[in-house]
Amino acid sequence: MTGERGTARWRPRDLPVFVVPIIAGFFQLMGSSGADAHMRYPHMLLDPTAYALLATGPLALLFRRRYPTTTLAVVMAATVLYLLRGYAFGPVFLSPVIAIVAAVTAGRRALSYAIPSGVLGVLAVVSLFTPFGPFRLAYWTFGHTLAVFTWLVILLTGAEIFRVRRERADEVRRTRAEEERRQASEERLRIARELHDVLAHNISMINVQAGVALHLMDERPEQARTALSAIKDASKEALTEVRSVLGVLRQVDESAPRSPTAGLARLDGLISRARVAGITVHTETGGEPRPLPAGVDLAAFRIIQESLTNVTRHAGPGVTATVRLRYDDDGLLIEILDDGRGAPGDLPGGGNGIPGMRERVAALGGEISTGPRADAGGFRVRARLPVPRPAEAPAQEEPGEEPRAR
């Protein structure tokens, strides 16, 4: 973000609001004073009224961002009064130009056209019909009116182009900011899911094994040693995976990761830790196993991990779980069954595990169903993740092939 801000294009509205009025006031006062001193045609000499009118326009420009149409009306009125008094021209149109551009870019298009056009009409009528008197135009001709009209059309056209380009740039900027916020939100959710899956699984294993170790410490110290060894392995893996997630969060993982990425290649280790926790786990694989996209591979592993974590925490001791994987032509079917006494959905307050699985599956365009098993008791998680088979890889699974159990 910082880098983008540092390279952002400079815009006129980034200036403080008083900078433009100061510049416009300086040029109007100094330029009109010079024109007054060197004017060859008869005109009224600049007096306090003239200087007050010259200063009114720049002072009104201080409010151009908040009240663009009011500012335009005040600036045009001061300019018309200055011209009707017959003072030397000078750069008196500088403030009206700025006020017109400010009003058009602020979206006040109708009044931005009407006010200058009305003022130009007044000047044309006065120049034709009232050449004498207290309100008069010195050496103003119809040619001046035509020239000012031409410049007014050019100015309004340029202001419209500037307005359209600024609105498009603002829209692009808003879209980019919304996209960055959406990506940041998705990244936070992804990291939260990863941390939950990693910590919930390993801490559940540690909790179960710690209870076993405390129960068997005095009577069966050898089994307690096994439980403590499982605690050590689970805590080591938890630390490794948490460091990996934090490394991504800190954007320091620029090189290839040093530890294997979570995926079905590590399924055997996950099953082994579940068995150490006292769960009897059977695995069945159907179809022809093949490499999976990284997102699908990670989601499949996390779904199985979270399901076994829930079995460990909620299904009771001595439970039997079955993990089934079936590779179809267009997807991967994952099913985890247990015959335990309880289920995550039965617990008060719920949790983040099953919602996290649903988010993962939805992000990949798959389907998932969870709930108690009506036939044999326990709980079932069934998910299907779409995995298109490459065109060059023909299907290997024969119709009616039975799943291969391990």
Image (spheres, grey):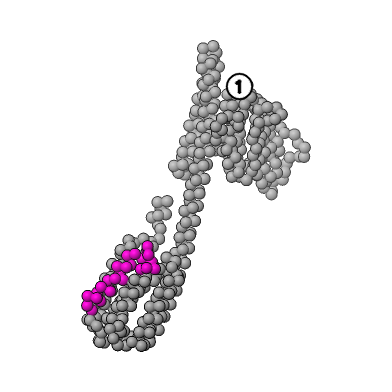
Q: Is residue 174 left or right of residue 124?
A: right
The magenta-colored residue range is 46-71
x and y percentages locating residue 6 in the rendered image: 38, 55
Q: Is residue 7 left or right of residue 197?
A: left
Q: Is residue 197 above or below residue 70?
A: above
Give the residue at the far top of this rendering. 219
Count of numbered tags: 1
x and y percentages locating residue 175 in the rendered image: 49, 56
Give the residue at the far front of this rendering. 133
Residue 29 quadrant: bottom left
The residue at 40%/74% (across/down) is: 115
Towards the viewer: 161 or 312: 161
The residue at 73%/40% (across/down) is: 397
Residue 316 quadrant: top right
Q: Is residue 100 above or below residue 236?
A: below
Towards the viewer: 156 or 393: 156
Task: Tell me the amino acid under the disc marked 1.
Answer: Pro
Note whether residue 334 is visible: no
Q: Is the residue marked by circle 1 packed among few (<14), some (14-19), or many (20+) residues within 10 Å? A: some
Towards the viewer: 126 or 181: 126
The residue at 50%/40% (across/down) is: 191
x and y percentages locating residue 96 in the rendered image: 35, 73
The kind of secondary structure element at disc 1 is: loop
Magenta residues, dominant SS class: helix
Q: Is residue 66 magenta?
A: yes
Quadrant, the C terminus: top right
Note whether residue 82 is visible: yes
The residue at 55%/13% (across/down) is: 220
x and y percentages locating residue 54 in the rendered image: 28, 74
Q: Is residue 399 left or right of residue 213?
A: right
Residue 197 quadrant: top right
Task: Name the residue that disc number 1 marks.
Answer: 317
